[in-house]
Image (spheres, rainbow, N blue to C red):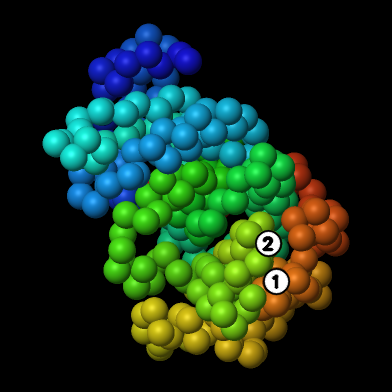
Amino acid sequence: GIIKDLSDLKKLSVLGHGNGGTVYKVYHKNTRSFYALKVLRLNENGLGIRQPATLEAEILKRVDSPYIVRCHAVFDSGNCNNDGDNGGDISFVMEYMEGGSLHDVLREHHRLSEEVISVLAWRVLEGLQYLHGMNIVHRDIKPSNLLVNDRLEVKIADFGVSHVVEGRFEGNDYDAGTCAYMSPERVDPERWGGENANEFAGDVWSMGVVMLECLLGCFPLIGPGQRPDWATLICAICFGEKLEMPEKASPEFQNFVRRCLEKNWRKRATVLELLHHPFVTRKNCCSSDKELGDYVLGGR
Ligand code: ATP
Ligand code: MG
């Protein structure tokens, strides 16, 4: 790898905080480039976590796709306490995405046009197809994990990393942010046949929620007046009947989202089907990229 040591990276600022840690903007002197450094702390309930984390790191470094945020290096501080397996932190050196996350974009612009969303959907689907082809399920597709660079390309981030964090936060499952984009078979496996579900279908559901959110400008499964707590979300995900679809949404968009948000995972569209969906194939890359550019750079 190009980055040999953590000490070669100079921390410039904090880009954001997540469930498991903090993301910094860093500068690498030797290559004179910027990276994003995600530091996950393992010193609380990290028992047994380091092993899978290291495994995951190996997978992360092998992933190489224009639709996925690149992970250049992984460093394990190795600061174990007496229990041996926990303590210390793991740092991921990632491609720096100048535009921030789709969450930031939505906060600034509230909603996106169908043209922009169809390019977005196409890139996310290409990314998912790549990951799934490597047998990796993302499990945490949501706006803050879709990042935009200065060429206005959207890429998937944080697959595997969420894997690493999983299991550390017993009792923290109530965090609305973590279950809001989860599929019915994941939040209620008994009712929705989650036991033998195809895990890849869960990523399709999450993507559908995100695309609808992009058009509506707010989280689509619960009303604006409802508290986004665990119970409300589960109800909406598993029993919500009517999908609030914007009146002006095209039939292609509506069908696309309905195919993603099919509660029964067996009936839900697959990534490959969606790549051929009219909503995605009608995209005009060039003009839409420019439009996304206006959106993302306009307010910065
Ligand atoms: P979770 O911990 O569930 O993934 P999260 O996505 O909000 O939640 P992080 O993944 O830690 O948390 O990221 C926090 C924020 O840091 C993101 O929302 C994004 O704004 C920013 N960020 C993350 N990775 C990068 C990156 N590679 N380039 C630029 N900004 C980034
Ligand atoms: Mg994230």
Q: Residue at x 67, y 73 (%)?
A: 261
Image: 96 above or below 203: above
Q: Earlier in the sequence, mark 1 or mark 2?
A: 2
| Mark 1 C-beta closer than 8 Å to ligand 1 | no
Asked which quadrant contains residue 200, the reply is bottom right
Image: 281 above or below 60: below
In the shown orientation, is residue 39 left or right of residue 271?
A: left
Dots 1 and 2: beta carbons under 8 Å? yes
Asked which quadrant contains residue 238, the reply is bottom right
Label 1, on which residue?
A: 265
Q: Residue at x 50, y 57 (%)?
A: 140
Which residue type carries mark 2? Asn
Which residue type carries mark 1? Trp
* Residue 147 seen from this side: no
Label 2, on which residue?
A: 198
- Specify few, some or many for label 1: CA neighbours under 10 Å numbering under 14, 14-19, or 20 or more: many
Q: Which quadrant does the C terminus fall into?
A: top left
Q: Nearer the viewer, residue 113 or 213?
A: 213
* Residue 269 seen from this side: yes
Rendering coords of residue 196 (x, y %): 65, 67
Q: Nearer the viewer, residue 83 or 275?
A: 83
Q: Determine the residue located farthest toward the top in the rendered image.
A: 30
Q: Nearer the viewer, residue 207 or 179?
A: 179
